[in-house]
Image (cartoon, rainbow, N blue to C red):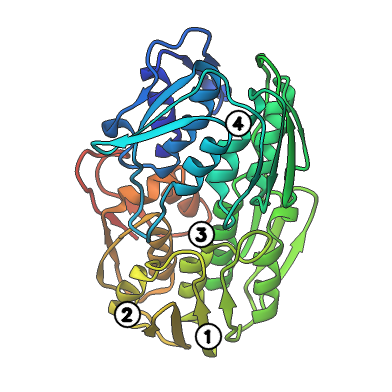
Amino acid sequence: MRDIQTTRNLLAAMGAEVELGYGRAQHRTTLHCKNLTSLEASYELVKTMRSSTLVLGPLVARCGRARVSLPGGCAIGSRPIDLHIKGLEQLGAKITQDHGYVEATADRLKGAQIVFDKITVTGTEDLLMAATLAEGETILQNCAREPEVADLADLLNKMGAKIEGAGTATITVKGVSKLKGAKHRIIPDRIEAGTFLIAGAMTGGDLNIAGCDPAHLGAILAKLNEVGVKTKSTADSVRVMGDNPFTASDLSTEEYPGFPTDCQAQFMALATQAEGVSVITENIFENRFMHAQELIRMGANIKIEGRRAVVRGKTPLSAAAVLASDLRASASLVLAALVADGETIIDRVYHIDRGYENIEEKLRAVGAQIKRIGEMFPKKAAPARA
């Protein structure tokens, strides 16, 4: 995925030694961060990825200073980093902003009790990393409970941190003086798994998603079962059987363990093929219905009412030239193209490479007629065909 490569480039620019695996170990990255030569995350490196702000807390905690460009990423709504800044200030950092950069300085961060004004995944992760090296105890409240937060805490604990409660609303961190190296296998991508589950349901397929964690897919599986899609889970796989007609169901995106906003666009594509009216409410981002207009171009019956989308199905979809506006919108258009009559061309498909690795190859391997035109990571937008 391109975001992983962007992160590797960012760390290398700071002086980290980044070693990539080859062959069977091609998905392994070895990092040596003993000597950092730069404490800045430049705009050129972070403009495509909001999560680049996650170096802010760790850098100021370890080195006493960090300078990070304000983030970019998908244009799906306002995603300020004010909660990051407020939390770091409570830990004792001095924050200044100028010319599009945030600079944080501190002799050493001090433990504090921090209550997030609203649930934030990256804010929780950023302050969690900062607190590991802060002096004393830090208590974070109203934390994000996503599995990715707990996975980060697992890694930090392997590195010598003292963290309890990750995956709950309250996390307690007892600061340590330094961290050490560790070996860690990251958890499966629940959004990629959810996307393929919806693909199987939409196409009437019998598809087994291997190497996932069904425990992290509860809301998605519950919604699929609610609309009439059959699923069967094992310890590390989910089989979706789309041989039954499915019906409309309302959906509201929520923080974990609710239905993830990152699967809302994919569910909207599914809703176009469901019998009845589905009302989809987006509670996380205020501008995350841009894919709706492209689905309408393909024949979908969708009406946007503020944060609600009213989808009337079942409507036959037909091929069209459509534009991917962001990462998950790209995925929804690919799913719609799988069931549309004719050949659909999706432009700006580079968005999808941020969160999916070789999605066209994986879909083609299970019978989809899909191919990419152009390079995997083009400098300019390269169209893909589905």
Amino acid marked by disc 1: Ser
Relative height, residue 29 to residue 253 (above, below): above
Circle nearer the viewer, 4 or 3: 4
Name the side, left or right, on which 193 lies relative to 84.
right
Q: Position of residue 301 (x, y in %)?
A: 38, 87
Circle nearer the viewer, 3 or 2: 3
Q: Are marks 1 and 3 in contact (CB under 8 Å)?
A: no
Camera-nearest residue between 293 and 45? 45
Q: Which residue is mark 1?
A: 278
Spatial CA span between label 4 and label 2: 43 Å
Amino acid marked by disc 2: Ile
Spatial CA span between label 3 and label 2: 20 Å
Q: Position of residue 268 (x, y in %)?
A: 47, 74
Q: Are marks 4 and 2 in contact (CB under 8 Å)?
A: no
Quadrant in which the N terminus is drawn: top left
Q: Mark 2 or mark 1: name the one nearer the start of the chain.
A: 1
Farthest-out residue, top: 35
Q: Which residue is mark 4?
A: 129
Q: Position of residue 14 (x, y in %)?
A: 39, 17
Spatial CA span between label 1 and label 3: 18 Å
Q: Which mark is residue 262?
A: 3
Relative height, residue 313 to residue 129 (above, below): below
Amino acid marked by disc 3: Asp
Q: Are marks 2 and 1 in contact (CB under 8 Å)?
A: no
Q: Which residue is mark 2?
A: 296
Spatial CA span between label 2 and label 1: 15 Å
Q: Mark 1 or mark 3: name the one nearer the start of the chain.
A: 3
